């Protein structure tokens, strides 16, 4: 596809997917996701999609360190309601990468619901951050927050943005708006991918592993 060239430079996210091995979809069970996968899911590339991708990436690194994360073995908690602001977009990216799903997710195989992912994604949770991830095997959790103001828009966007939103730009201005928009996304994903002030992570201590 004709994605911007910088997409190829963005760090990927690899996980082990045991369900794929069990049902013969993959011998190794190793799934590698790239930012373009998140863009295909969301239908666009923006600071929110980029931030969600980086938050999950950071959360998995905190929980698993050098170990390969297990897709389907992670719970995701969202602070806000599913229909509030950009919560739904962020949650969709989290589902893509972790497998955690709301009540519509895969219910599992057999009486013990093996490989289930249903109800592993929850909203309106009392957490001090946009999102939290928790390992179901150990109970270890991490709270994640995002501050995209660390990477401001180009000053030219002060004029272009309202005109573009109102549909009052010509062809050249529209192309310039799109270029500047993706330039900011590129800076977020390439220059600030590991910026601890862009994606803030802190340990989330829980009394018991796994809520379900």
Image (cartoon, helix red, strand yellow):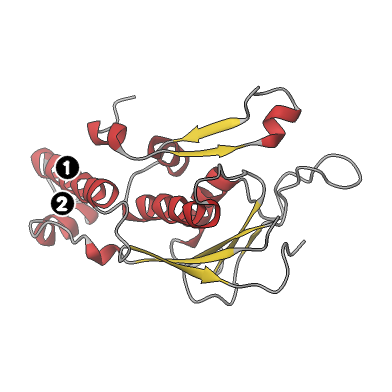
Q: Is residue 169 left or right of residue 148?
A: left
Query: Which of the 4 image quarters holds residue 179?
Result: top left
In the displayed structure, 21 sits above or below 142; it is above
Query: Which of the 4 image quarters holds residue 205?
Result: bottom right
Dot 2: few (<14), some (14–19), or many (≥20) neighbours within 10 Å? few
| Residue ID at (18%, 57%) | 161
In the displayed structure, 203 sits above or below 27; it is below
Q: Is residue 104 visible?
A: yes
Classify mark 2: helix, strand or loop: loop
Taking the view exactly as shown, the residue that stands out farthest to the front is: 66
Classify mark 1: helix, strand or loop: helix
Which of the pair 205/168 is nearer the observer? 205
Which of the pair 33/41 is nearer the observer? 33
In the displayed structure, 151 sits above or below 171; it is below
Measured in 3D between alpha carbons, the distance from the residue under mark 2 to the one under mark 1, in whole angstroms, is: 17 Å
Q: Is residue 199 left or right of residue 186?
A: right
x, y percentage for residue 9?
A: 28, 35
Residue 8 image label: none
- The residue that label 2 is drawn on is 168
- The residue that label 1 is drawn on is 179
Q: Is residue 80 visible?
A: no
């Amino acid at each position: 596809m004709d994605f911007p060239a910088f997409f190829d430079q963005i760090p990927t996210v690899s996980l082990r997917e045991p369900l794929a091995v069990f049902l013969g979809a993959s011998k190794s069970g190793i799934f590698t996701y790239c930012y373009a996968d998140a863009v295909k899911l969301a239908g666009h590339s923006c600071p929110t999609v980029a931030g969600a991708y980086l938050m999950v990436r950071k959360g998995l690194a905190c929980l698993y360190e050098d170990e390969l994360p297990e897709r389907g073995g992670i719970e995701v908690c969202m602070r806000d309601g599913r229909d509030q602001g950009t919560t739904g977009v962020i949650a969709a990216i989290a589902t893509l990468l972790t497998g955690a799903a709301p009540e519509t997710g895969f219910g599992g195989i057999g009486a013990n619901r093996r490989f289930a992912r249903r109800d592993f994604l929850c909203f309106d949770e009392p957490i001090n951050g946009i999102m939290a991830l928790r390992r179901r095997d150990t109970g270890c959790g991490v709270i994640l927050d995002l501050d995209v103001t660390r990477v401001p828009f180009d000053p030219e966007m002060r004029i272009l943005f309202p005109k573009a939103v109102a549909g009052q730009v010509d062809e050249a201005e529209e192309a310039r708006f799109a270029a500047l928009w993706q330039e900011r996304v590129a800076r977020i994903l390439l220059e600030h991918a590991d910026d601890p002030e862009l994606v803030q992570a802190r340990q989330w201590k829980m009394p018991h592993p796994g809520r379900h």
